[in-house]
Image (tube, grey):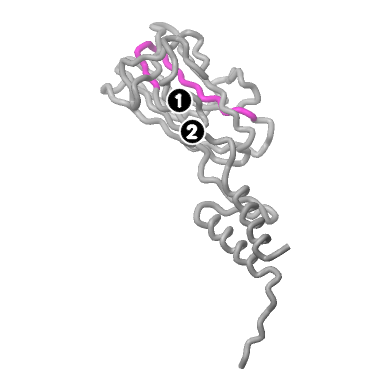
Amino acid sequence: MGRSSRVFLVLCWLALLVVPSGVRADGNLVQNGGFEDGVLTDVPHWDSGYTAQVTNTRAHTGDKSLQTTRSEGLTEVYQAVDMSAYGGRSVEVLGYMYGTSPVSGRIEVALSDDAGCAIAPSARILVGDLDGNDGSWIEAKRTVQIPEAPGYVYLCVLLTGEEDQLYFDDVSVVVETPTAVGLGGLRASGGAGVMLALGLAAAAATMGRPLRRVRR
């Protein structure tokens, strides 16, 4: 095998290490996180139990958002995000809420081995909450570590409201900067990953090249 062929194979191998798979073009693992798809209580990719609806009354971005519709009792809408390919990685969970007093609500996440997301309150991680405000969109954001253990397959994203007239929009789960993994567990992120790739490519370029005697 020629030197140029070896260089090409090493670069292809590095590309497989550095570039993640299964991520949508915008990086968001939540489907329909902006609620632009759907009509009334038909909310694609979300289980709303008919206690919330898609509305164009207001939106953080785009034209639509999700509105709670129960004037009494608890509204809970959820989506199970498949995390089976991201064990050991960190994800950023982000979402926006809008409501005026006495409206209250929260965005939570929980690790689960069941896509049904029947999660006890004590097992949930709070991303952010809203307890009435001046009528502006409130950001909720948190970084969550996904365990290495394969038992947790899903990250459940739960949108909860205790009154009607609460709105959710632009919900996302994004895997943080991918790492290059290999060489016995060596990890490098961002620029370090690029430097690793360049260093290994340079080493590959010298394979099979005879050493030159330095003339003195």
First-in-chain label (2 vs 1):
2
Q: Point out residue 130 in the picture as x, y percentages from the top left corner.
A: 37, 23
Which residue extends farthest right? 1
Give the x, y percent position of residue 203. Answer: 63, 66
Amino acid type of the residue that numbered disc 2 sits on in the rendered structure: Asn
Q: Nearer the viewer, residue 71 or 156?
A: 156
**Secondary structure predominantly adopted by residues drawn in magenta:** strand
Q: Crowding near pointer 1: few (<14 within 10 Å), some, many (20+)? A: many
x then y, percent, for residue 27: 49, 36
Residue lying furthest left: 134
Viewer-nearest residue: 31 or 48: 31
**Residue at position x 42%, y 21% in the image:** 35
Query: Could you tell me how far apart the alpha carbons at marks 2 and 1 are, in whole angstroms?
Result: 8 Å
Residue 160 part of the magenta segment? yes
Say which mark, if any, is on residue 33.
1
* In the image, residue 129 above or below residue 53: below
Q: Which mark is residue 28?
A: 2
Classify residue 211 as left or right of residue 102: right
Q: Residues within 10 Å of mark 2 (few under 14, many from 20)?
A: some
Magenta highlight on residue 33? no
Which residue does the image show at 52% across and 15% down from the upper left? 47
Q: Position of residue 167 (x, y in %)?
A: 37, 18
Q: Secondary structure at mark 1?
A: loop
Q: Which residues are magenta?
A: 153-168
Give the quarter of the figure containing the N terminus: bottom right
Q: Secondary structure at mark 2?
A: loop
Q: Are marks 2 and 1 in contact (CB under 8 Å)?
A: yes
**186 or 76: nearer the viewer:** 186
Q: Is residue 54 above or below residue 30?
A: above
Residue visible at 47% across and 33% down in the picture = 93
* Residue sitting at x 62%, y 26%: 112
Where, by quadrant of the figure, is residue 184 drawn?
A: bottom right
